[in-house]
Image: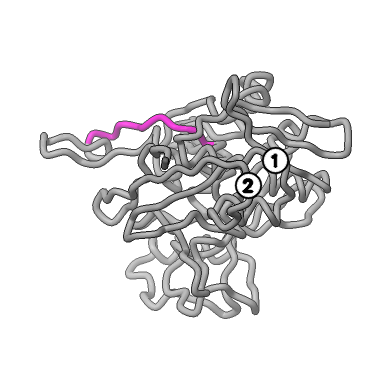
């Protein structure tokens, strides 16, 4: 079966998320191939051998997952907690981590860059770790500060909640994740998953629709407790899409990527996205990574001629 979704080719996060859909469909369904089409409308096509909608299959899988962090065996942070509250928070974090002998980074000093595992109902985990890559590849880690990949992934998938009131197990929903979007608007989410937006707090910074840089006018969304609007689906699927490839950072904070016309399996699609296959009918786009404090912000791309 082959089916398609709309995509905005000048939105880098949406293109990365399309590769994420391809990677996920290959894991969940097998034999997946993906291609872009831009003749009448800009679309991304997924093809699998079965009769299920691969986009629906991926979204349904992500709506029923558990998220855990991966830490090296016997890992503890270099800075020990200062008080009882920090100690309890650390112990909770350690309980949520899966211990692993193999670890992608040589210096896991903080929990913010720990890899994560997404565990579905089959209990076969999917590891996402590109931001912790200890190899010579660009890690393409955009977020910074006190946020962790685990916290971001949970927010994108499960939403965020406030502190529970007395006598309640959990607080009121503050921001929606993929789970809530799946419950509220399943048909629309399957038809156009990259277009369904929701107010969000922190993210991986893949979707430029939720990007902001502080201006010298006395305003910052963080300071005013305002939420930016973007796509949780783009954020989590883009993270999956970049697990085995990276866009081409050809100059400092200048990045390019490619979209292709012919159906490709994940192994070739990874190279195509990174502009590594010349003999393809393709279009190339480039964008700049701007800075907001220590955060790297993806901007809208322009097509290269």
Q: Position of residue 61 (x, y in %)?
A: 73, 40
Q: Residue at x 49, y 48 (%)?
A: 257
Return the mark for residue 173. Answer: none
Q: Is residue 122 left or right of residue 233?
A: right
If the image is split into quadrants, where does the C terminus sit? top left
Region of the chain picked out in magenta, as a range: 224-232
Q: Position of residue 28 (x, y in %)?
A: 79, 46
Return the mark for residue 262. Answer: 1
Q: Quick check: marks 2 and 1 in contact, CB under 8 Å? A: yes
> Mark 1: which secondary structure?
loop
Q: Residue furthest left?
A: 217
Q: Residue at x 66, y 41 (%)?
A: 21
Q: Residues within 10 Å of mark 2 (few under 14, many from 20)?
A: some
228 drawn magenta: yes
Q: Is residue 88 left or right of residue 297?
A: right
Q: Position of residue 88 (x, y in %)?
A: 46, 62
The residue closer to the viewer here, 114 or 6, is 6
Mark 2, mark 1: which one is toward the viewer? Answer: 2
Residue that numbered label 2 is attached to: 280
Does residue 81 sit above or below 172 in this rendering? below
Q: Where, by quadrant of the figure, is residue 304 drawn? A: top left
């Amino acid at each position: 079966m082959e089916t398609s979704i709309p995509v905005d080719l000048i939105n880098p996060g949406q293109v990365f998320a399309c590769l994420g859909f391809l990677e996920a469909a290959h894991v969940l369904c097998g034999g997946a191939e993906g291609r872009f089409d831009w003749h009448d409308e800009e679309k991304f096509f997924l093809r699998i051998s079965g009769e299920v909608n691969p986009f629906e299959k991926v979204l349904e899988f992500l709506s029923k997952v558990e998220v855990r962090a991966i830490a090296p065996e016997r890992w503890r942070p270099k800075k020990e907690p200062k008080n009882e509250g920090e100690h309890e928070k650390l112990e909770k974090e350690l309980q949520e981590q899966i211990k692993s002998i193999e670890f992608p980074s040589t210096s896991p000093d903080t929990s913010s860059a720990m890899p994560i595992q997404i565990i579905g109902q089959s209990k076969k985990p999917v590891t996402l770790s590109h931001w912790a890559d200890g190899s010579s590849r660009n890690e393409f880690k955009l977020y910074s500060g006190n946020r962790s990949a685990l916290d971001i992934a949970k927010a994108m998938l499960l939403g965020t909640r406030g502190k529970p009131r007395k006598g309640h197990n959990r607080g009121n929903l503050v921001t929606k994740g993929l789970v809530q979007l799946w419950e509220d608007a399943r048909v629309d989410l399957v038809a156009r998953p990259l277009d369904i937006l929701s107010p969000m707090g922190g993210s991986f910074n893949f979707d430029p629709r939720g990007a902001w840089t502080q201006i010298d006018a006395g305003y910052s969304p963080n300071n005013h407790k305002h939420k930016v609007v973007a796509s949780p689906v783009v954020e989590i699927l883009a993270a999956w899409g970049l697990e085995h490839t990276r866009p081409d950072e050809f100059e400092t904070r200048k990045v390019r990527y490619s979209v292709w016309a012919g159906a490709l399996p994940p192994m070739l699609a990874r190279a195509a996205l990174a502009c590594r296959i010349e003999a393809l009918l393709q279009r190339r786009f480039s964008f700049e990574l701007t800075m907001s404090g220590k955060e790297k912000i993806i901007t809208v791309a322009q097509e290269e001629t």
